Amino acid sequence: MTAALGQSGPAADAASANVQYAASGGPSAQGAEPVSYASVTQLNGLLAQLEASSKNTQAHLVKLRIERWKTDGSYKKQALARVDSIQRNLQDALPEILSQLRATPEDLPTTFKLYRNLDVLYEVVVSVVEDAGAFGSKDDLQALSNDLSGFEGTRKQLAQRIESLSSAKEAEIVRLRAELKTAQAAVPVAPPKKIVIDDNEPAKKPAVKKKPAAKPGNPSPAKPAAGQTPAAQAPAKPQ
């Protein structure tokens, strides 16, 4: 859990997303479907509550005096590592996810990414609260317990939002499929082309073959005229 908290996700291009309020009062991301005003209001309240819990938790973690706890050095080192991982998550990973979600308020992958990060964060804060109760002061325990309650409340609200968004997305998919099916049924089907064969069409004449031309230097013998006999072949000259 500590290692997961210390890691920060890929940098988001949230600055390029321009979220504006439409004329109806609901914000919409550029090139995306408009988001209802109620949905954005719910998200803004949830994120504001989470940011307040994050700010209070960071302030209370700084006041911890783990070095004064009555426990061995190895346990103090583990407690310090958990506190450090929580602080790095609250300062780096969490603000980045919140920025992504503000740019795309109803994006399910980003919403679930926040829930998963908050779930891991909650488990590690529980460990620090238990340590503070066992080795720290009552004031530290009370302050961190209040922070833990804040994270728990936000996590429950976020889970409900994920369920609501999932149902809405599923209903939208069903509606779009029905509209596509209706549109496909309304498209007229072109009739097949007919090929007409005329049996009375006259047969084509056979092509006339051309006689091969005589090769130069080898003239063909002339044919004798009618009534004439061919000339006798001249005898060969004696050598």
Image (tube, rainbow, N blue to C red):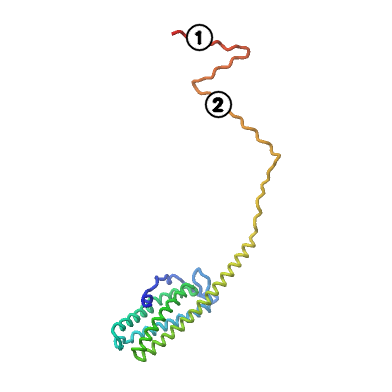
Q: Seen in the image, is 185 located left or right of residue 146?
A: right
Farthest-out residue, right? 200
Q: Position of residue 134 (x, y in %)?
A: 35, 89
Badge 1 amino acid: Pro
Q: Position of residue 68 (x, y in %)?
A: 29, 88
Q: Seen in the image, is 209 located left or right of residue 201?
A: left
Q: Seen in the image, is 128 located left or right of residue 172?
A: left
- The residue sitting at 53% across, 23% down in the picture is 214
Farthest-out residue, top? 238
Residue 50's image quarter? bottom left
Q: Where is residue 58 in the image (x, y as percent from the top left)?
A: 37, 83
Element under label 2? loop
Tell me the crowding category of disc 2: few under 14, some 14 to 19, or many 20 or more residues within 10 angstroms, Cα based.
few
Q: How far separated are the C-alphas under marks 2 and 1?
A: 33 Å
Looking at the image, which is closer to me, 151 or 132?
132
Looking at the image, which is closer to me, 172 or 125?
125
- The residue sitting at 66% across, 47% down in the picture is 195
State the mark number for residue 235: 1
Looking at the image, which is closer to me, 70 or 227?
70
Residue 179's image quarter? bottom right
Farthest-out residue, bottom? 138
The answer to whether residue 87 is above or below residue 190 is below
Mark sitting earlier along the chain (2/1): 2
Element under label 1? loop
- The residue sitting at 43% across, 72% down in the picture is 14
Q: Where is residue 135 in the image (x, y as percent from the top left)?
A: 33, 89
The answer to whether residue 177 is above or below residue 222 is below
Quarter of the image where the N terminus is located: bottom left
| Residue under pointer 2 | 212
Badge 2 amino acid: Pro
